[in-house]
Image: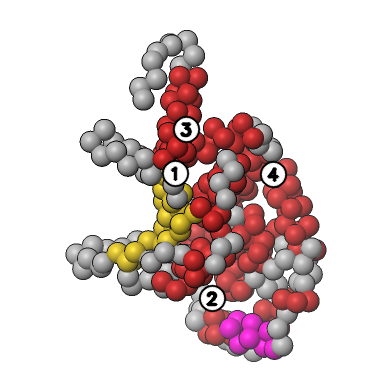
Amino acid sequence: MTNTHTGFESLRDEAVTLRRAGLSRRQIRDRLHIHNNDLLNRLLDGVPVPEWTKRPNAKDDLRARARELRTQGMTYDQIQLELGCSKSSISLWVRDLPKPERRAPGEQAKLASQKRWEHELAVRDVERQKTKAAARDEVGRLSDRELLLIGAGLYWAEGSKDKPYRRTEVVAFINSDPDMIRVHLRWLDLLGIDRDRLHLHVMIHESADVAGAERYWADLTGMDAASFGKTTLKKHNPKTVRKNVGEGYRGCLVIRVKQGADLYRRIEGWWYGIVLGAERDQPGECPV
């Protein structure tokens, strides 16, 4: 049986260390991949807030919001979950307001069930983060050979490929995942591909923040946005409901290696070498 308490304490140690290093709640949330406010509140309970995150009148803003939520009928627990402040502060801010009407037994039972479910989700989040952290630590630092093989595999999954009926031998990698782009660029560095041989451009929906996406990918790659090729805009289809919306949507980045025919042939050879290596007990001919 998994020791949940130990998992929580380990995650709390990481959160407290980051907090004492001066990180904000948002930074800690993103660093540890925690998207449950209740869990984050418990992890940071009793840890002082860094001075730089404090704003003038921040308490006044919280107080006003707490009073607003109280007038909507929220309990102290619900307000604490929403705002992330202590119940003692909430009590001081709203004690002059009338208490919420006592809920019907059925509604009270529903709220109790919801609270139990929120606790269960928090416990699952602890286990989820523990599993991910353990798996991450199993990998460790990659050797050049490991990165070579991983990069070839990722390219064969996500990059453009030559076809018997369309001989192009173009090295072009397209992805929307910034981590995939980071690994691909590191792989190209390993292969000795200079950045001046790269041609980058963005592919994005026409209704998105195009300029913001171009700046994002330029910052991620460390390249000047002015050096990017013309952005490809995807036309809007009114019959479809887009799910890739919001501030996190930045389209895809296309990375093409100029004069990459020889590199393409090597990538294809590496890939089929991986295939044959995986089938070590079943030797066969390379299908290139």
Q: Few, some or many C-alpha atoms within 10 Å of disc 1 (few <14, some 14-19, many ≥20)?
A: some
Horizontal and vertical percent for residue 113? 50, 56
Cα separation, mark 2 vs mark 4, equals 31 Å
Q: Reading the chain from its start, which is encountered first: label 1 or label 2?
A: 2
Closer to us: mark 1 or mark 2? Answer: 1
Please name the predominant secondary structure of the magenta segment in the image. helix
The residue type indicated by label 2 comes to: Met
Residue 210 located left or right of residue 145: left
Closer to us: mark 2 or mark 4? Answer: 4
| Residue span colored magenta | 57-66
The residue type indicated by label 1 comes to: Gly
Which quarter of the figure has residue 206? bottom left
Q: Nearer the viewer, residue 6 or 232?
A: 232
Closer to us: mark 3 or mark 2? Answer: 3
Please name the residue that numbered disc 4 is placed on. Answer: 7
In reply to whether residue 63 is colored magenta, the answer given is yes
Label of residue 266 in the image: 3
In reply to whether residue 98 is colored magenta, the answer given is no
Residue drawn at point x = 38 percent, y = 44 percent: 170
Q: What quarter of the picture does the C terminus occupy?
A: top left
Residue drawn at point x = 41 percent, y = 73 percent: 209
Which quarter of the figure has residue 245? bottom left
Horizontal and vertical percent for residue 279? 46, 16
Residue drawn at point x = 74 percent, y = 48 percent: 9
